[in-house]
Image (cartoon, helix red, strand yellow):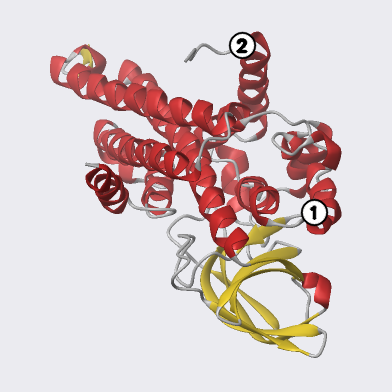
Amino acid sequence: MDFALTADQEKIRDTAESFLRDASGSAAVRAAMETEAGYDPQLWKHLAQELGWCATHIPEKYGGLELGWVEVALLMEQMGRRLLCAPFFATVCLAATALIEAALEPARIRYLPEIAAGRLIATIALAESGIDWRPDAPAAMARRVGEGYLLDGCFRHVPDGAQASLILVPATLEGAGGFFAIPADCAGVSRIPLKTIDATRRLAEVRLAGVRLAPDALIAEGARVTEGLTRTAALAAIALGAEQLGGAQQCLDMTLAYISERVQFGRQIASFQAVKHRCALMMVQIEAARSAVYGAACVAASAPPTDALVMESACAKTLASEAFFFCAQEAIQLHGGVGFTWEYDPHLYFKRAQSSGAWLGAPDALRERVAASMLDRA
């Protein structure tokens, strides 16, 4: 497998890095954090509609660019470096992927062109307490009422749940799996914005109380739902791992910049061997995570069997989560006393590392999944 980026992929990476360096600097992130929506609508319009990032992995027949998961990972890495405040992960990596992997053709035709064009913000409510997909524990119940459906359920942590116009919901339907597309303004849907540790990414509690839906709201059912959403969760975990990789790299970069300026005992602290060792450990974890994430993205681009995709995803997300957490805490420590203050950025990355590490599988749970799979093969 060739891990070298093509010229086009390098251009995507460099363009994203240059754009986000200017558009999503520290001041812009902090300003977006204070708004009600949690992001800058003009910035979102620019990257979604003008740059076309929302169309990255959507097939051409639905108005997309039909690129692969390596390209998605390149964008997510740069977004993670700059803590971009935008509903990209929820809309593109979760909702659009779920439509591609699990939904039937009419739903794809209806929603994917809108997402690709940047006109639709969407999200998915995967589980009751987070975004881990568990087919054995659905958080919503659906039943047929006449020609339509009636849904009830509660999802406590839905990414961009208060900002999305479309919410995708898996539910139990007559003892099997059902997958529904619900307009956010539908009667019976309530969305409660949550205050969380990471103010750079918004979460909401979504409650469904007697939500009546038309027949076309059911976009998939049966084994297709379990298979499709299992793949969706694995692919989204790779994208999240790429975002974590970018955050870890930025933690190292801003730490190197700080220790090159900070003087102690008449010397730059970057010259102290103990400080060099700690930065070297950060780099080692970052490079290990980079290999795992882009290796998994290359595998994902080849449309592998679901079991193989899940294992690659678990390995990549584990290494990326641990690298991000390690680098964020080291950034705080190597910044010294100011590392804990609001004026400096390490605490923002530490909070993102803490929150994203639990999404789509914490490292211990993912290792257990990989071990169980390998033992079953033995």
**In this rendering, would 308 be left or right of 181?**
left
Instruction: Mark 2: give few (<14), some (14-19) or many (20+) Cα within 10 Å.
Output: few
Of 86 and 142, which appears nearest the observer? 142
Q: Is residue 81 left or right of residue 38?
A: left
Measuring 64% from the left and 49% from the top, which residue is drawn there? 101
Which label is found at residue 6?
2
Looking at numbered disc 2 in the image, what kind of residue is underneath it?
Answer: Thr
> At x 32% / y 49%, what residue is drawn?
366
Return the residue nearer the eye: 147 or 70: 147
Q: What SS does tag 2 mark?
A: loop
Q: Are marks 1 and 2 in contact (CB under 8 Å)?
A: no
The mark found on residue 194 in the picture is: none
Residue 235 shows in the view: yes
Marks 1 and 2, the one that precedes in the sequence? 2
Q: How many marks?
A: 2
21 or 223, nearer to the observer: 223
What crowding class fits label 1: few (fewer than 14 Cα within 10 Å), some (14-19), or many (20 or more)? few
**Residue 53 point in image, percent of width and height:** 73, 35
In the rendered image, residue 372, in percent from the top left (x then y), is placed at 26, 50
Indicate the quadrant where residue 277 lies: top left
| Amino acid bearing label 1 | Glu
- As drawn, is 91 to the left or to the right of 286? right
Q: CA distance from mark 1 to mark 2?
A: 32 Å
Asked where in the image residue 250 lies, by quadrant, the reply is top left
Tell me where residue 297 appears, x and y as whole percent: 51, 30
Judged left or right of residue 317, residue 65 is right
Above or below — where is 110 with respect to 287? below
Position in image of residue 3 (x %, y %): 48, 15
Task: Report helix, strand or loop for mark 1.
Answer: helix
Residue situated in front as seen by the camera: 165 or 99 = 99
| Label 1 sits on residue | 105
* Quadrant in which the C terminus appears: top left
